[in-house]
Amino acid sequence: MRHLEPSEAASPDAGFTLIEILAVVALLGLLLGVVAPNLMGLVPSARLDGSAKTLQAKIADIRSESRIQAKRMQLELDLDKGRFRVILPPEERLTSDQEIERDEDLADDRKDWIDLETGVVFAGAGTGKDGLVEKGFYRVTFDEYGFSADQVIALRLENDPTMVWTLSIRGLTGMLELHRSEDGQIFYPTVTEEGAF
C-alpha cells in the first residue's frame, strides 16, 4: 500500500466552507420561492382553487360585515365576464349626483369588480329550489343577521368543462363547502322545506 506524500495530501483549501454552502442553499431557496408559485398557476386545479378561495373569503367577509353592521349586503356575480363585486347597503351607496361625477372620473366601473383567475369562468349560480342561472348577473344576498338562502356557485375551466368546483353556501349556518368534480358535475344542496325545522 502506497503512502501519500505531504504534497499529495488534501490541502486545507480543498472543499467548500460552511458559508459557501449556506449561500448556495439560500440562493436555491430564493429561486424556489419565486418559481414555485408561478408553476402552480400553470396547473388547472390550482387556478380553480385560487378563484374558489378568493370567492370563499369574500363571501365570509360580506356575511360577517352584514352581521356586524346589521345591514343587508350582496355579492353580485357577472356570470358572463367571470367577475364579482360587493354591493353596498343602500344608505352607503352614492347619491345619483355623486354617481354621475364618479362615472365621469372613472370612465368605467372596472375598479369595483374582482376578476376570476385566468381561464376560470362561472358555470352558474343558484339554489336547489330555483335552479341554476348560467348567464347574466346573479346576486347572493345576506340579511342583517348574516343569513341567506342555501346557494351554489359553480366555477369551471374555460377550456375544460369537466373540471367543476362548486362552492356551497349554507344560508343559516354560514358554512361554506367546496366540492371538486373532474367529471363536470355541479353539486346542488338539498332543498330544505319549512317542515324540516
Image: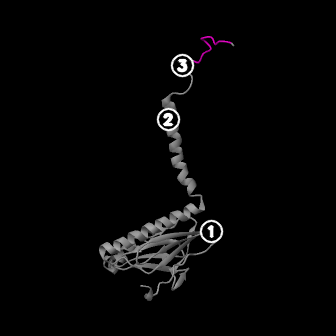
Q: Nearer the viewer, residue 67 or 3?
A: 3
Residue 108 in sight in this render:
no
Q: Nearer the viewer, residue 66 or 158?
A: 66
Residue 54 x, y percent position in the rendering: 47, 65
Q: Earlier in the sequence, mark 1 or mark 2?
A: 2
Where are the magenta residues, as a range? Answer: 2-10
Residue to which mark 2 is pinned = 23
Question: Which quadrant of the figure has residue 135?
Answer: bottom right
Up-down: is 131 above or below 103?
A: below
Up-down: is 195 above or below 126?
A: below
Q: Which residue is at the far bottom? A: 195
Q: Which residue is at the far right? A: 1
Question: Which quadrant of the figure has residue 139?
Answer: bottom left
Other-residue count near label 1 (Cα within 10 Å), few / some / many at <14 / 14–19 / ≥20: few
Residue at 51% of width from left, 69% of height from top?
178
Q: Earlier in the sequence, mark 1 or mark 3?
A: 3
Could you say whether the residue bearing mark 1 is in a helix, strand or loop?
loop
The kind of residue tagged 2 is Ala
The kind of residue tagged 1 is Glu
Q: Nearer the viewer, residue 125 or 92?
A: 125
Residue to which mark 1 is pinned = 182
The kind of residue tagged 3 is Pro
Other-residue count near label 2 (Cα within 10 Å), few / some / many at <14 / 14–19 / ≥20: few
Residue to which mark 3 is pinned = 12
Q: How is the image coloured?
A: one colour
Q: Main secondary structure of the magenta part?
A: loop
